[in-house]
Amino acid sequence: MESAGKRNGNKDRQKTEKGNDKKRLTKNRGWQAEDARKKQNPGVRKKSGEEKRGQAPEPERPEVQKSLCPVSKRCGGCQLLDIPYERQLQKKQRQVEELLKGFCKVYPIQGMEEPFHYRNKVHGAFGYQKGKVISGIYKEGSHQLVAVEQCMLEDKKADEIMGTIRGLLKSFKIKTYDEDTGYGFLRHVLVKRGFATGQIMVVLVTTSPVFPSKNHFVKALREKHPEITTIIQNLNDRQTSMVLGDRENVLYGKGYIEDELCGRVFRVSSRSFYQVNPVQTEKLYTKAMELAGLTGRETVIDAYCGIGTIGIIAAEKAGKVIGVELNQDAVRDGVGNARRNHIDNIQFYHNDASRFMTRMARNGEGADVVFMDPPRAGSTEEFVEAVKVLRPKRVVYVSCNPETMARDLGFFSKKGYKAAEAWPFDMFPHTENTEVVCLLKRAARNV
């Protein structure tokens, strides 16, 4: 039954509504106009029922976009992660064009179809945070360890293995290394995976060769991840920022993995350089071979050759290939890779490329094409001078740093080599880094 109070309240509301009919007709036009304004300006928030009449509504706060990675702002590893990928490519294209303007034409950048989880190598530093074992990377420009459990750039399986190792450390009562005190056992873990072969290497970087319960640890790790093909203990007992030491002990498997690139098989050891993005590397190297213009008769120098990837791929279309590298482990891998691929027209030398080419020229030897793939610091004036003395017709320059490439192109122009064309490749999506391959030709006056 309806109460008297409720009935009286209804009557009062009815009277009020009748008295306000005229006002409502006038206000309706105003509300319709207001609705139209709100549609054009969605940033104006609708009035809530709790707001008092006559009180101005608070402006709506702009919606903050949640990052794809919860630690991206702290680790600094993927500076462009929350920028749409097409805009990333446009930004990198403009950067390369700006750096190389005045040298040569820059062709459109080659991006990735799937620009996530492309890294085949994952490195994790280990430590503690609030008594819990963590692994991750150091905050850019510091020694503050940022815990990373999942990374949008790293191979998913490698991240899973890192997580398993974090759990095993607690079970086996293994202490992580403390940089401040110098105490602790496990410093870093490195995981490398062959994307084409599926082979996986795990490198445990420790401060002591004595590994308590190492057999049980290896067994436990492999039970969780039977896809692991080799496990290595690397000894680094120095107070240094270098990750790997010089001594190693193979705990399981062959001590290396193999991967396929451009139809060739390559052996990858713990300390040898291998491109971290195999999908884009294939595109990059295919373009490098095209720019070299090999016909089957040329003598080719593969400077900074690493494990011989470029030289071995070039050998099929060259007369003779010479690989030169300062890293002795990489040279050893290069020799094995040539043998593995039944390549008999390539030789490797453990030497400085600049001195090696200068000596070749003094001995009356020459080369038709020089491939160069220097580190981020770029090449040197000494190297460019050695190229001038050797006098190849073409230089194919692969660079992971367009800024140092631009500097080096200036060195080359003074020595009679003109940049003809450059092709950027997005080897490192969601980061500021871009890979570029550039063709230089010996100027006519330098013939």
Image (cartoon, helix red, strand yellow):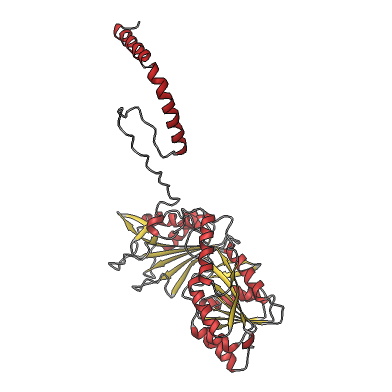
Q: Is residue 145 visible?
A: yes
> Residue at position x 58%, y 94% from top?
362
375 in relation to 434, above or below: below
Q: Is residue 350 visible?
A: no
> Residue at position x 32%, y 10% from top?
6
Residue 405 point in image, percent of width and height: 51, 74
> Residue at position x 28%, y 67% from top?
180
389 in relation to 427, above or below: below
Q: How many labels, in total?
A: 0
162 in relation to 242, above or below: above
Choose top left, top right, bottom left or bottom right for residue 307.
bottom right
Residue 384 point in image, percent of width and height: 53, 84
State the quadrant of the C terminus: bottom right
The residue most toward the left is 181
Classify residue 230 as left or right of residue 237.
right
Q: Nearer the viewer, residue 354 or 173?
A: 354
Q: Nearer the viewer, residue 108 or 359?
A: 108
Residue 95 point in image, percent of width and height: 50, 66
Residue 283 point in image, percent of width and height: 62, 65
The residue most toward the bottom is 363
234 in relation to 414, above or below: above
Q: Nearer the viewer, residue 152 or 160?
A: 152
